[in-house]
Amino acid sequence: MKPEKTILINGHKHIQFQHESVSENEMLKRATTFYNMCNKRRSIRDFSEKEIPIEVIENLIKTASTAPSGANKQPWTFCVVKSAEIKHKIRLAAEEEERKSYAERMSDEWLEDLKHLGTDANKPFLETAPYLIIVFKKPYEIDAEGKKHPNYYVNESVGLACGFLISAIHNAGLVTLTHTPSPMRFLEQILKRPSNERAFLVLPVGYPATETFVPDIERKKLNAIMNVY
Ligand code: IYR
């Protein structure tokens, strides 16, 4: 095997980047194919109870962990909940917060903006989906001596990892939705997370229920979202 070419920058080893170049034709084909695949993704709220292998979930989370992060701190933890008992606890706590949100915390305009999606405080998908992936962000790390060390661009980094994760779930032929009960402290308590972890997003993962309806909504057209200078 060819010896790996390396250099030192600030005393740290850098390895040669192996780039797989493609022709412009192939580039356009791949960009179009990937868009067409991503454009089929929908947020799904009705799940089947059908099981999925844990190895699939492991690979989805490994994909999420390939996202870029501030100073490569990878400030995330993914908790995978399969236990019916824990899913039940999470559903009860989430619905309690959601009932308060829908009844008093969300503005009239917000409630109006959600009407076309048909959401309410009931979250059965938190129990029907075979897995819940609860994403936690880590604003700081705690070392062996108990000293805190900051992470950087934590919301951006964890948001990017969630984007990768959602795309990976869709690519695997599964469905999800971005569920954000607020406040989410109950997730840290139920899952007994360390003091430097904050719940960021809940992603139920599974198959859609046999007959599933989604809102008839459209994505903005390219000319409304892209400006070329
Ligand atoms: N978190 C609530 C409300 C909600 C808020 C937004 I913004 C949505 O796009 C959808 C729902 C819920 O999960 O019902």
Image (tube, grey):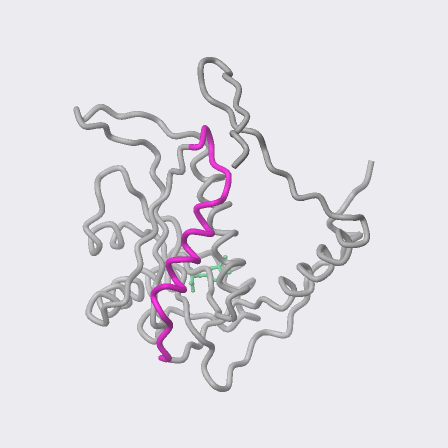
- In this rendering, is residue 16 above or below 98? above
Query: The magenta stretch spans which residues?
Result: 49-72
Q: Position of residue 74 (x, y in %)?
A: 40, 38
**Image quadrant occupied by the C terminus:** top right
Q: Position of residue 215 (x, y in %)?
A: 59, 74
Relative to 119, 86 lies left or right? left
Relative to 122, 229 lies left or right? right
Q: In percent of the image, x 31 and y 52: which residue is there? A: 184
Farthest-out residue, top: 10
Q: Which residue is nearer to you in this view: 2 or 197? A: 2
- In this rendering, is residue 98 above or below 71? below
Q: Which residue is nearer to you in this view: 166 or 23? A: 23
Q: Position of residue 126 (x, y in %)?
A: 34, 69
Q: In percent of the image, x 23 and y 28: which residue is there? A: 143
Is 76 inside the magenta-drawn segment?
no
Q: In percent of the image, x 47 and y 77: which residue is there? A: 208
Relative to 73, 168 lies left or right? right
> Would residue 14 be visible to someone looking at this image?
yes
Is 54 inside the magenta-drawn segment?
yes
Q: Which residue is nearer to you in this view: 8 or 27? A: 8
Where on the picture, by quarter, is residue 79?
bottom left
Where on the picture, by quarter, is residue 116?
bottom right
Farthest-out residue, left: 145
> Would residue 122 be visible to someone looking at this image?
no
Q: In percent of the image, x 55 and y 26: which residue is there? A: 5
